[in-house]
Image (cartoon, grey):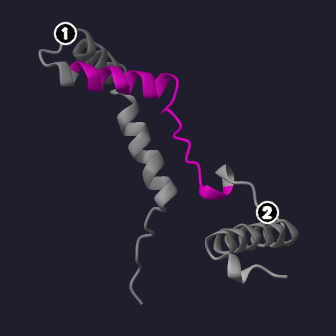
Amino acid sequence: MKFKPQQPTKAQEQARIRELCSSFAEDAVEEIVSLMKNGKQEVTRLRAATTVLEYTIGKPIQHVQTPEQTERQITNDERREQMRLLVRQAFAKVVSENPELAPD
């Protein structure tokens, strides 16, 4: 049986990468701020400013409103009453257009 070296876990690999990158963090922040202040193109300055904001105050939250949240759920009794009202209105319209259909 051959000896296999143990592979690092995903968490260990991420920790190793974080450690390697941490030595460049200060330079990276300085570069982003420099681009934000001195970038030649507006899109560059905007992206750098967005990066600074997202890392300091966080990304904005997008609220999504579903139909369930905008319309109140009605009960079966309310639904029945709405249907009765609609039928009465429809019947009244038919009778007004055709008086011979009116009940005696």
Q: Is residue 86 above or below residue 62?
A: below
Q: Residues within 10 Å of mark 2 (few under 14, many from 20)?
A: few
Check the picture and name the quadrant holding the C terminus.
Answer: bottom right
Question: What residue span does the magenta drawing correspond to?
Answer: 45-68
Check disc 2 and report its element: helix, strand or loop.
loop
The spot of residue 86 in percent (x, y) is 72, 68
Q: Residues within 10 Å of mark 1 (few under 14, many from 20)?
A: few
Q: On the rendered structure, is 22 left or right of 82?
A: left
Give the residue at mark 1: 38
Q: Residue furthest right?
A: 77
Check the picture and name the quadrant holding the N terminus.
Answer: bottom left
Query: What number of labels is visible?
Result: 2
Q: On the rendered structure, is 103 left or right of 34?
A: right
The spot of residue 99 in percent (x, y) is 69, 75
Q: Is residue 49 magenta?
A: yes
Check disc 1 and report its element: helix, strand or loop.
helix
The spot of residue 100 in percent (x, y) is 69, 81
| Residue positioned 61% across, 57% down in the render | 67
Q: Quadrant of residue 23?
A: top left
Q: Quadrant of residue 13?
A: bottom left
| Residue positioned 36% across, 35% down in the render | 21
Of residues 101 and 36, the one nearer the viewer is 101
Of residues 78 and 94, the one nearer the viewer is 94
Q: Amino acid at mark 2?
A: Ile
The spot of residue 78 in percent (x, y) is 84, 65
Give the residue at mark 2: 74
Instruction: Measure how far apart labels 1 and 2 are at the Cα level.
Output: 58 Å
- Which one is closest to the eye, mark 1 or mark 2? 2
Q: Is residue 55 magenta?
A: yes
